[in-house]
Amino acid sequence: MIRMTGLTVQFGGVRPLDDLSAELAEPIVGLIGPNGAGKTTLLNVISGFVMPTAGKLEVDGRSYLALAPTKRVRLGLRRMFQTEQVVEDLTIFDNIVAIIDHVGSDDPVAEVGRAVAYLEIASLDRYGAELNLFERRLVELARTIVGRPKLIVMDEPAAGLTESETATFRHHLLGIPATFGAQVLLVDHDVDLIASTCSETLVLDFGRRLAVGPTRAVLADETVRRAYLGALS
Amino acid sequence: METFLPFLASGTGIGAVYALSGVGLVVLYRTTGVLNLAYGALGALAAFVAWTMIEAGQPAPLAISAGIVATAAGSLVYGGLIAPRLAYRDRVVRAVGTLGFALILLGAIGWYWGEAPRRLLLATDKLYLELWSVRLTYTRILALITALVMVAGVALLLRRSRLGLSMRALADDRNVSAVVGIKVGTIEMVAWLISGVFAGICGIFLGDLVRLEAHLLTFLVVPAISAAIAGRLSGLTETAVAGVLIGVGEALLTPIQAIAPYRTAVPFVVALAAVALLPTHRSVESD
Amino acid sequence: MLTSPLPSSGARRYRSLVPIAAGTTFLAAVVIAFANAYWISTFSSVVALALACSGIAVLYGQLGLVSLCQYALLGVGGWVALRVSHGLHASFEICLLAGGLVAAMIGVLWGLPAFRLRGLYLAVVTLMLAGTFQVVISASGFPDGGPGFFGRADAAQRQLMARPRIAEGDRAYLAYAFAVLLLGLILVELHRRSVPGRAWALIRRSETGALAAGVNIAFYKAWAFALSGFLAGIGGGLLAGAVGQLDGRAFTAADSILVFALTVVGGAYDWFGPIIAGLLLRAVPSLLTDFAVNGYIALVIFGVALLHALVTAPVGIAGQLSAVAARFSARLGRAGRRA
């Protein structure tokens, strides 16, 4: 559960987040809005890379702002970035184990096995350099589901994937809360992906909350259509 | 107090040159992103060329100009031929490239001129001013004045001229500058030229004020780097002030017997302190 | 549906140690069997330098960090080893370890302010350490058997460092040095294949990504720096034992720069790159002297080699040799399959 109260970020004359308040409790939550709306800034605040100038942020009842980024990861925060982050010189196995190294696990090898079985990744020996974009995204997804995750934040994870790859990705995403017990916050421009996976969505515009609530209602909202989706005739 | 005064005087002279060096480094770094570790070696080249010409009987102004031209040319050669091939690598690699250049220069100077100790003597060394019983040679006064004029000059250039505006644009964001129509290549070459001229002048002054020895002059880039870091690699005034303070600090330790042999470590320690006091810079985007 | 089995916890990672052990042992055997007295003594320096260069390779190859103080840390290690040897008459191994540990500590403490900053600041800070060490050591010199903290004796009472009892002769000492080098290379490889190596790879890929993966970046940079300093320190002890004494005027900042430059040229991404680097550092000046060419030309050659490595061959000589070997074995593999 993510709870933000009056979250504000100010850099000089720019205010990427402006008095943002929301309570997001659904298993898969969407975060949408036009470019520059503050979505990545919000993700950076959650990750700990940006300190807000005002406001509070709580994840699963715990105040996040006092915690260092690495501490948040140990408590169960995971992130998938817009640009892929697979290490080319390491094997798939090592790429995934690298996360377990720092979050801990009773049996790292079994942990990797579980993630890999869930995502249907075939061979663990291949090096990052040999993988195509979809395979790299799967490896990154594997990294998010190991080591008892609590909150997985994804920034346009399906960007650049084909229709069928996106469908596979969507299939894996839908099972994560039930199988691994983690909440997912998904940022994407693909409204179909949001609509088909997220039960709740938050819409940002100019750093402010434009709408929040059940996805279908939010996507049908007039103000949201005007600001972002385009009005339907 | 009296024991320290002459050292205060000599320290201010050298400090002025350190300040000038630091500013030359910062202007180049801000415009091109390259921290030129060969700055001292380039200065050494100017000093040796000037020395050779003076020994051959040429008038001092001609010799000095020749030295500056040689260094400016060297700077342009690196900036035009080699720096562009490392332009898309990260800043550390580009600085390491200048290290390679420094090795080449150091080797070439050592090979051509050899190791014999030399003095670069200028006419201004023999004339001096007496201020409060301290002898200030004209060379030191000239160093102070030159430093003031050149630092003010380059600051004015950056703030008031079109060229300066382009250089500051490049410092801010190289790619956007190119898109906006600024001729990145040309502006960078101008920065290398200006920096080369600064290096040449500093090298000649240091060859006179300290010693004409290639190894030593090459490593006098270190006080310049210290000054530049104290200025956060961006502020010209802070860099200049830091340079003067380093020079004075170094000199003032000379009469203290116990520390004297270690006083050349002052710039190193200052740089370390400056880095320790820098705010942590979490670079969220890549270099 | 996994097509390859999950790796069991240790067996596979140790496979990479075999070529390192085999290659180093083979080189040692060849040199010790066939070299004359001059080359035996030269190779003792080469091995010490190779250890220092392997430390640079850890920092630059694994993390992209530039350290310009490695020869100074070699000097620190040598100083401590000499002091412990003359003052405490401890066994050679203790002297080496002491040298390694102190060098590691000094490297980390000095570099600490720069670990949270951009890599450029670390390069500058290490250059400062090299310069400070140069000033200090040329003023105070290395211990040579005398009393007091600095351990300086006057001419009549100067001592040479005691070599290990099992390796007093030159050939035996070289074998000992090669054994230490092998242990150092194995230590590095073990790091690469476990938690620190993976953390370093994540940091290298992206610091932000590493943070998001829970990696404490300053800690792992410090660890790499400590390992690098440790290797340099041990190398310094070996050098002291090889020559018997060290000259305070021979540890300039320029030497540290050369160690870095030649590691890049030799290859920072393969285990034998540092050995090539050590060879170049010692062999090139010797060859130039043999051909009556001015020693300064070595600097020019090294500068050009560094620029060449940076611009066209970042993997260095070792990397290029590895690539050729890989292509060759791929071709053999194809030929074998066709037959």
Image (spheres, grey):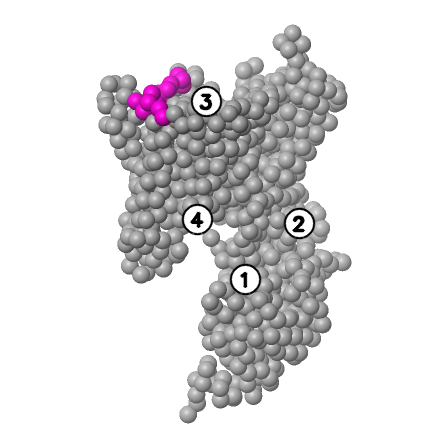
Q: Tell me the residue that label 4 is attached to.
A: B234
Q: Tell me the amino acid under the disc marked 1.
A: Arg
**Label 3 element class:** helix
Q: Establish whether labels 4 and 1 are both on one chain.
A: no
Q: Is residue B126 magenta?
A: yes
On the picture, is C13 further left or further right than C88? left
Q: Establish whether labels 2 and 4 are both on one chain.
A: no
Q: Tell me the residue that label 3 is attached to.
A: C285
Residue C98 rendering spot, x and y as whole percentages: 70, 29
Q: How many marks?
A: 4
Circle 2/circle 4 CB separation < 8 Å:
no
Between residue C297 and residue B158, name the one nearer to us.
B158
| Residue C226 placement: quadrant | top right
Q: Tell me the amino acid under the disc marked 2.
A: Val
Q: Which residues are magenta?
A: B109-129
Q: Tell me the amino acid under the disc marked 3.
A: Pro
**Label 2 element class:** helix
Chain at tag 2: C
**Label 1 element class:** helix
Q: Tell me the residue that label 2 is attached to.
A: C195
> Which quarter of the rendered picture does the N terminus of chain C lie within?
bottom right
Which one is closest to the eye, mark 4 or mark 1?
A: 4
Q: Tell me the amino acid under the disc marked 4.
A: Ser
Give neighbour class at mark 4: few <14, some 14-19, many 20+ (Cα, 10 Å).
some
Chain at tag 1: A
Q: Tell me the residue that label 1 is attached to.
A: A136
Between residue A96 and residue B159, name the one nearer to us.
B159
